[in-house]
Structures are given as structure tokens and as C-alpha cells.
Image: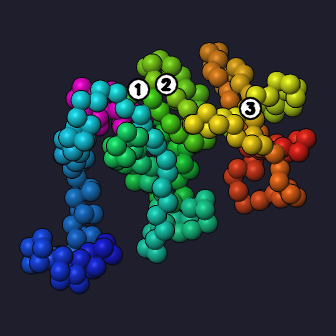
Amino acid sequence: MDDIRHLQSDEALGSVLNLNRLPKATTLGDWLRRMGRQPQMRDAWVKVNQSLLQSALHCCKKVTLDIDATEIVAHKADAQWTYKKNRGFMPMVGHIAETGQVVAVDFRDGNVPPAQNNLAFIQQCRQSLPEGCCLSALRIDAAGYQTKIIEYCDKEGIAYAIRAKLSATMRAQIEAISETDWQPLYDKQGKRVCGQDTYRTSHCIGDYEKAFTLIIQRKAIQGQASLDLESEDCLDEINQGGYV
């Protein structure tokens, strides 16, 4: 809504685009809220977006989906506290990796956990793809480390890369790795990354019996190690033998 105020004051842009009149931000916001309550609006938005996606994808038949919660800091009266300690909203956004376009959005209050209803959102993204284009791969952070999502991907033949949450079983596996089992980590150009190693093993989640490949990485600690108690990453790290 703040962008509308900038557009109204930009005479040069208004002249180029022939924007003689623009609604006020409050007027446009009121219209969007009223339209957002109409169930048929989502179907209309999906059809419009499918055409835009098709134009950008051309003949691409398979795409990779990236989904992530995106914090919007706001000062509205109904804004809720997010896990990042800000008041605002936390919509889940699905992007097509090949083009960077948004395929679907699930608007959520700030206090809604990022892991909530992610399988339903993945299915929504699949349905929002243009005709003839299918979802071949999924990438998501720890909010997607759920049995039902992994089981769904296996069933539908969708490759996936999901950041795992550290469990007691996983911790035991890591602590049992011998020094000779670690392998050098290489970058995209095939050059070894100094001070970083990787290890691959099989792992299962919950009561789902089909195993997946678990990739563990370690990084040499430079200087004195510090623990950031406010960071979620520290919950998924093990400080062991000069590595983290």
C-alpha cells in the first residue's frame, strides 16, 4: 500500500504510463480486503497467474518448487507476533526455481507456525501450475521436515531436498562417525571447500519405513566458538572435535 503513495507522487512515471488517476492506498486496501473474502477470486487469480507462468516457462515441462514463510512486518492493530519477535504476518510463498515466479501464496497471521499445513500448500502449488507442467522437485527448510510430506513426495515421484531437524537418533549417528568416514566438500565448480566436510547415510523419519539419504555437513570452527541462543540454527548443530 505504501508503494501507491510513491506512484502518486512520481509525475514522470505517471506521464510515461499514462496514469492520470490512482486510487488512494486506503481505498485500494479496502477493495482488496473485500475481494479477498470472495471465494471465486482465488480461482480467477490462479487462471491469470497460470497464463503468466506459461509465458515465462515456454516449453518447460518440469519445475522445482521452493516454499518458505516470508515475514511481513506491519503495525496494523490485528498484526500478531512472529517467531522473529516482530509484529506482522507470515505468509507461505511458493516460488518456481527456474523463473523465480510466485506460483501460490497462503496468507497467514504472524503467530501461525511456519510448519503448519505445508502439505496442503504444496498440493495447492501443484494445482496452480499451468497445464502440461508438473512438479518434479521440492526444496524446503526444516518447516517441511514432516513424515506426511516426505511420504507424499515418494508416492508422487517428487525429488526433494529438505533440511532435517536434529533428533536423538540423528545425534547418535553423527557422534558415531569416524574421522576417516568424512569426505571433502566441493563447490559447484568442483573445488574443495576449505575446512568443510560431508557425510552421507540413510535415515528414516518417524514410523515411515522408507529410508532417504541424509547428508551431514561439518565446518571447522575458526577462533572461539560462540552460541547464539536466539538462532534456530543452534538447535540443529553439534559442537564436536573442533567442528560444528
Of the residues shown, which amino acid type is indicated by label 2?
Answer: Ala
Write down the residue under mark 2: 159
Q: Secondary structure at mark 2?
A: strand
Give the alpha-carbon distance from disc 3 to disc 1, as whole Å. 29 Å
**Closer to the N terminus: mark 1 or mark 2?**
1
**Do the CB atoms of the residues marked 1 and 2 lie less than 8 Å apart?**
yes
**Closer to the N terminus: mark 3 or mark 1?**
1
Q: Secondary structure at mark 1?
A: strand
Magenta stretch holds residue 203: no
Give the alpha-carbon distance from disc 3 to disc 2, as whole Å. 24 Å
Magenta range is 120-134
Write down the residue under mark 1: 136
Give the alpha-carbon distance from disc 1 to disc 2, as whole Å. 6 Å
Above or below, 182 against 17 in this view is: above
> Of 143 and 239, which appears nearest the observer?
239
Q: Select label 3 or label 1 by which is in front.
A: 3
Q: Quadrant of residue 2?
A: bottom left
Q: Secondary structure at mark 3?
A: strand
**Can I make out residue 19 in this image?**
no
Q: Select label 3 or label 2 by which is in front.
A: 3
Where is residue 11? Give x, y as percent.
17, 83
**Can I make out residue 215 in this image?**
yes
Above or below, 139 against 209 in this view is: below
Of the residues shown, which amino acid type is indicated by label 3?
Answer: Pro
Write down the residue under mark 3: 184
Q: Residue furthest right?
A: 241
Residue at 46% from the left image edge and 75% from the top image edge = 75
Where is residue 239? Give x, y as percent.
85, 45
Where is residue 52? Give x, y as percent.
21, 44
> Of 132 and 70, which appears nearest the observer?
132
**Do the CB atoms of the residues marked 3 and 2 lie less than 8 Å apart?**
no
